[in-house]
Amino acid sequence: MAYAIGVDIGGTNTKFGIVDKRGNIVHQSRMKTSDYEQVGAFVDDLYEHLLPLIQEVGGIEMIKGIGMGAPNGNYYKGTIEFAPNLKWKGIVPMVSIVQEKFKIPATLTNDANAAAQGEMMYGAAKGMKDFIVITLGTGVGSGIIVNGQLVYGHDGFAGELGHVTVIPDGRPHWGTGLKGSLEAYCSATGIRLTAIELLEKYADTPSPLRDIPAEEIDSKKVCDCAMNGCEISKEIFNYTGEVLGRALANFIMFSSPEAIVLFGGVTAAGDLLMKPTRYAMEANLLPIFQNKVKLIFSDLKEADAAILGASALVWE
């Protein structure tokens, strides 16, 4: 049996595993990305971590290749380019460094594209040829599948739906400076900012969120408060869903997907997020698109999805 290695390179942690073609992760582990100032030292240690796992499945000849997902990963060039949350600055030739070390084929894409690949091979979008994955975490990422193929664009960077403008001249993004982007409202970070704004707006309305220092409010605490009946917390998710739903309507009218798959930590809010999102999405669609596009949560375990998505690149 052949195996693939899946590597998810994040700003803080790197998760990796050995995966069979059915999507079973037979071995997995992790290491701290943030410990490595130099990419060469990182790849050397990744090799040392993976070597015993590779031996467990019968040696390197059993491995078909390595798939990697990384922020600002360029599929065409095999490079990580100007990733703001990695210590390795500029353009990093990750594929060539990994191939040199492991002596097997390697492929790289951005992390949200890897998630879309994983959904198509192993997850909620299995069997679909047209769908969009939206990752709702610290930021908002996206992977777009059209006719069974990932949309990369001419330079490898297509599908930055998190940075489309959803509210003209709206909230400035903390990293890019762009105003009114989807990420500024619908990421976990955006939800925190909405919470602070609404607590100020409804200054006379009681809320358990007021007992939490502003710098400690996060999307999980807002979710917990909403599930316990806090009206302001519910309103935060209503507003987030309204913004997200309007954006999804635009995405649908662009590529007419069979489904939109929502993935990431923010989806733990369940119906608190899903109901207002679906309502706003349908309300902003032309009749020819209404009630045709499935809006679903990913059914992949968040801990495994990044590894599965990266490994799926090997089987392309």
Image: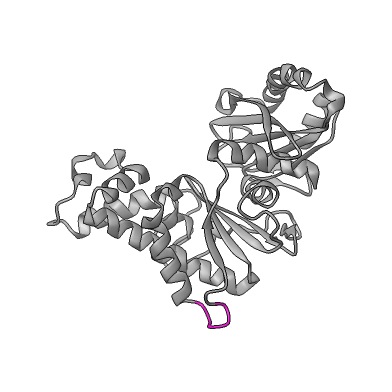
Q: Residue furthest left?
A: 204
Pick the front one: 46 or 167: 46
111 horizontally vs 67: left or right: left
Q: Quadrant of the N terminus?
A: top right
Q: Where in the figure is residue 192, as x and y percent of width and height?
A: 34, 48
Does residue 167 appear in the picture of this structure? no
Q: Where in the figure is residue 255, as x and y percent of width and height?
A: 65, 70
Report the magenta stretch's main SS.
loop
Pick the front one: 30 or 304: 304
The vertical placement of 96 against 202, above or below, is above
Image point (78%, 22%), residue name: 57
Q: Where in the figure is residue 35, as x and y percent of width and height?
A: 57, 23
Does residue 229 appear in the picture of this structure? yes
Q: Where in the figure is residue 261, as x and y percent of width and height?
A: 56, 57
Q: Residue furthest bottom?
A: 287
Pick the front one: 39 or 130: 130
Image point (57%, 44%), residue name: 300
Image point (36%, 43%), residue name: 220
Image point (45%, 50%), residue name: 267
Q: Is residue 288 magenta?
A: yes
Q: Is residue 72 magenta?
A: no
Q: Which residues are magenta?
A: 285-289
311 horizontally vs 305: left or right: right
